[in-house]
Image (cartoon, rainbow, N blue to C red):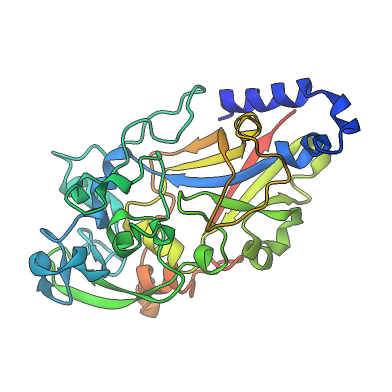
Amino acid sequence: MLLKGFGDILTSVMTVNPALADLPTASSILDTSNYTFQAVTFGKDSQGFTNHSHVVSSTQYVDGVEASGASSYDSGIFTIINYGSNLANGASSYVTSAYYLEFSSTYNSVPNDPSPLDDRLERGSTISTNLSNYQYASALPDLGHYSNPTLDSQLSSIWNKVGGFPPSGASDYYFYDNTSSFTFSGQVSSYFNANGLMDKNGYLTFNPKSIQPATARGTEASGGALLVSSTSVPVSSGQVSVSIVLQDGDACTLAAFGGVKHVGIYCLDLASLLSSGLLPPYDWDALNNTRKYKLVATVTTLDDILFHRDFAALGYSGFQTVLNQNVGTGFTYGGPNINLTFDFK
């Protein structure tokens, strides 16, 4: 769905003064790159931010021991309890629908219906109230989408409860069945963070190379989200395809925190940046991102788009092998691929 924000961008494009071209200090405002897609975020139902792997020590376990005595919110261990472990091909996969059923009396897992007036993915609060007694609770973000707290100095130690994305280095996780019995363990590592593609507020940048052939998604994903051209979606058709590849631990942790039900597309909020005295070009820096964004389009689904299952016949764990290692699923681009097509005709 294209939003009011997209209309704002079109208005800016059509009303910017071409005479700025004669001013060396301001001519860069006319650069078309200022008005293209610049960032992507991932979201889900607002109540999901206090459920799934966001749940803290009172109901989680670490290495087979109840974690009520664990310090620093499970000591940085990423934990998963699978309430669908008794389902076919679900023993080693995180089954979100089983979690919804288990807690249906207290948990509304439906994302908000999108509106053209939206300026964030979820209108309800996305602060994890489970962490209200954390010493830096005031720093917990309410963004309407997944944040990336591993880059936040006040929140990096509890990324495993705030959610979204793991650090770039190997982080331990423990996987349990619906009786809280230990099943297996492993490690997760963020592809996005390893390549400096996402800031602390969860904004995934676009590949600066812009339009790439569809066959290049796997290699070019190291530059961020992609604007993709192909024989089925040629530029001349008035369409553009946005492709986001979730590789390594990013798909793994997003699935365990409740999956993805919203995808947001953003342009630069040029008016806000200029009013702050910031002139283009706006370089990307994941650690100190000065860019301000405007939500221009959303895609929303009732189903978790990171649905996965075990490959029982081959002994593959859906969580560890399929999502985290991207093995045995035939992923063409190195992981689950989210592909969105926008028609501007």
**Residue 30 on image: x %, y %:** 81, 34
Q: Which residue sits furthest right? A: 22
- Residue at image coords 60%, 56%: 285
Above/below status of 231 relative to 123: below
Residue 226 appears in the rendering: yes
| Quadrant in which residue 344 is drawn | top right
| Left or right placement of residue 332 versus residue 199 in this view | right
Q: Quadrant of the N terminus?
A: top right
**Residue 270 on image: x %, y %:** 65, 33
- Residue at image coords 63%, 65%: 222
Residue 308 appears in the rendering: no
- Residue at image coords 39%, 48%: 304
| Quadrant in which residue 10 is drawn | top right
| Left or right placement of residue 244 versus residue 259 in this view | right
Above/below status of 97 relative to 172: above
Q: Quadrant of the C terminus?
A: top right
**Residue 139 on image: x %, y %:** 32, 47
| Left or right placement of residue 211 versus residue 46 in this view | right
Given residues 219 and 130, the one toward you in this image is 130
| Quadrant in which residue 301 is drawn | top left
Given residues 317 and 287, the one toward you in this image is 287
